Amino acid sequence: GAESPLPSGEHDFVVVANRLPVDITVAHDGSLTWERSPGGLVTALAPIMRQNAGAWVGWSGTAGFEHEPFDGEGMRLWPVPLSEREVADYYEGFSNGTLWPLYHDVIVPPEYHRTWWNAYVSVNRRFAAAAAEAVAPGGTVWVHDYQLQLVPSVLRLLRPDVKIGFFNHIPFPPVEIFGQLPWRRQVVEGLLGADLVGFQRPGDAANFLRSVRRLTDLQVRGPQVTIPGRWSRPDRQVRAQAFPISIDAAAFDELARTPEVLARAQEIRTELGSPEVLLLGVDRLDYTKGIQHRLKAFGELLEDGQLHAPESCMVQVASPSRERVEQYRMLRDEVEGTVGRINGEFGALGRAAVHYMHHSYPMEEMAALYRAADVMLVTSLRDGMNLVAKEYIAARSDLGGALVLSEFTGAADELGQALMINPHDIDGTKATIMRAVTMEPKEGRRRMRNLRKRVIEHDVRRWADDFLGYLAMTAPHQETP
Ligand code: F6P
């Protein structure tokens, strides 16, 4: 044909995410070493990457880091550089100061700054350009999460020959909230560059489709949006649907059965002074997780004398997160103040009521904590999925333990046998914690058996296969590069 060929790369399958799936260290001589970062996504995608000459496009996590694509973890790792300014404006600013609170029910007020938006646009273009360079003719690109919502439409302009999937790991808000965003239309149009837009819950997909109806003139029928073809191009269909993400349940189950983990679980209880009741919270230190609500409920149970410390105690693991964002600093001060007050009031010498850890731990230690805990508390005010709930279940092959779960998590859609709470209802939460503490072992085992069936059958591999299966079924594009 008369058209000049589009540039194209050599990877049939390309993942685009804000972060690369490795932690990179640069030695003095400039050489790189890396370690695979923990996380279900890379575990699920690694085999697909190996079979399809895959590439992963993402930021290293360090401002100013620039490097040619290199091979590691059975894939091509393709770093996208971000300057200090871009980290502040695109990542800490627009992604985590605007979109994150907006998409989580405006728990804290989102900030709208044009400089942040401009950085978001230019960084999204850079990710799209990298994906366009990496992907082979007719290949597949899977874009992840709220940091990269403009990548699908930019990539489609650059490479109309490829299939584009997008998955949103966090909630998608109702249009009444989403509508606050000054650039709401650009974001919707950005996502509609994809062939398939995946969400955690059916409710998130429905919210997105309502936004499409309200903010564009496009036709929406069921889960499909029709984008009219221009010039000689045919119409294009975009599908929006729920694909609830999961964990590598079998691997977690296996880890939590090892003698080392079981011994460590025993040791944890001994170190805590062999409490009668051990409550556990595990979160990134984020205001969406309802850590304050959980501490308030526990503090009141001690105050009322329904629970007694130190016979009952709580372990709260709060892994450091987004520490340069103002709202996260404020939250840390509040949580640490509350923990101090509870311990000051109810702790004893050498026996805290709340054991608070501002660290992250390896998977082995997490599995041991899950095995040690009698009650797992997941109290999110809003949460896309909450994989901690699923990890707890996968770890409990002994059918012990009880899960208290906020109805505002994506996980609540699937885990009906958990003890549900509205974390804003402190009395209700207290009553449900007491129900978990006093539950008959028989009922606990029945519930846990049921929960485990769901989590083990619907693991992260099945999630990826489902999403990619649907994406493969979308109509092939006409253009070839
Ligand atoms: O799922 C939400 C998410 O923002 C992911 O995109 C991210 O990998 C994770 O939480 C941790 O956040 P961050 O990358 O900002 O440290």
Image (tube, helix red, strand yellow):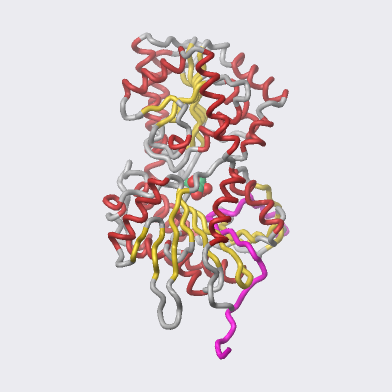
The answer to whether 327 is drawn above or below residue 148 in the figure is above
Q: Residue at x 68, y 48 (%)?
A: 35
Residue 123 seen in the figure? no
Q: Residue 29 magenta-drawn?
A: yes
Q: Position of residue 319 (x, y in %)?
A: 52, 36
Snapshot quadrant of residue 381: top left
Q: Which residues are magenta?
A: 1-30
> Where residue 277 sits in the image (x, y, percent)?
50, 14
Nearer to the camera, 190 or 479: 479
Q: Is residue 419 magenta?
A: no
Q: Decide which of 376, 282 is in the foreground and name it.
A: 376
If the image is split into quadrants, where does the N terminus sit? Answer: bottom right
Task: Using the image, determine if residue 360 lies above or below residue 370.
Answer: below
User: What residue is rendered at 63% in x and 62% in y?
Assistant: 13
Up/down of 270 relative to 385, above or below: above
Of the 4 image quadrants, the one containing the C terminus is bottom right
Q: Is residue 159 left or right of residue 398?
A: left
Residue 279 pos. (x, y %): 49, 20
Residue 38: image quadrant is top right
Q: Looking at this view, is 451 or 332 the one in front?
A: 451
* Left or right: 281 as drawn, with respect to 71: left
Of 319 and 185, nearer the camera is 185
